[in-house]
Image (tube, helix red, strand yellow):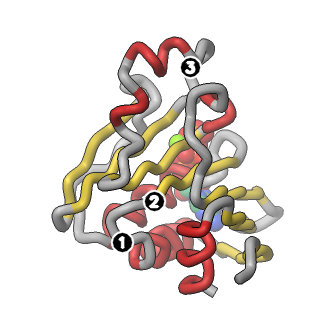
Amino acid sequence: MKNELSNIVIADENAMLQFGAKLAEYCGDTAVIFLYGDLGAGKTTLARGFLRGLGYTDKVKSPTYTIVEPYAVQHKKIFHFDLYRVSDPRELEFIGIQDYFIPQAICLVEWPEHGKEVLPVADLSCHIDTQMTGREIKLTANTERGRKILAQLA
Ligand SMILES: Nc1ncnc2c1ncn2[C@@H]1O[C@H](COP(=O)(O)OP(=O)(O)OP(=O)(O)O)[C@@H](O)[C@H]1O
Ligand SMILES: [Mg+2]
């Protein structure tokens, strides 16, 4: 099974929403996905597409100030993190980070670089590169679970 899916071209915001929805389709009830990319790369947009794809219709806001935003859709637990403002991993221990990364949940994490000392290994790492027009995505599977999701996406 392949560990990587690269050169995924995302032409515009709508395509990013669609990509998020497609990813959601193959994640079942459990996955840890790290979202890498510069400010404005489209990480929150992908997460929004992921949630909307599952049928969530309310607003999906960026959890920059709250660190984590919980969602319940289709009997799935989804935790959307934004660690941009986290400067010390102890802040994550303080919010009880390990209680979120449970097998019965999906965790989408923006700025995982800011929590790498305390975060578990991601099933999938998603790198978003800003191009002249649009974005390009590279997905890397780091676990067996991640490879399964990747195989379905390919
Ligand atoms: N191909 C594209 N995919 C995603 N977003 C795009 C694309 N082209 C333009 N955009 C725009 O880029 C912005 C992406 O914002 P978004 O909040 O998703 O980024 P982010 O990676 O979460 O940033 P931050 O690190 O600040 O949280 C949106 O305003 C969106 O309309
Ligand atoms: Mg964001």
Q: Quadrant of residue 137?
A: bottom right
Residue at left 71%, top 76%?
Answer: 9
Amino acid marked by disc 2:
Ala
Residue at left 40%, top 78%?
Answer: 25
Q: Are marks 1 and 2 in contact (CB under 8 Å)?
A: yes
Mark 1 element type: loop
| Mark carried by residue 115 | none
> Percent x, y for residue 96?
37, 23
| Mark carried by residue 28 | 1
Label 3 vs label 2, nearer the camera: 2
Q: Tell me the residue that label 2 is attached to.
A: 31
Q: Tell me the residue that label 3 is attached to.
A: 86
Label 3 vs label 1, nearer the camera: 1
> Percent x, y for residue 55?
23, 70
Looking at marks 3 and 2 on the same chain, the residue that comes earlier in the sequence is marked by 2
Give the distance between the C-alpha atoms of the residues marked 3 and 2, in whole angstroms: 22 Å
Q: Quadrant of residue 145?
A: bottom right
Mark 2 element type: strand
Q: Are marks 3 and 1 in contact (CB under 8 Å)?
A: no
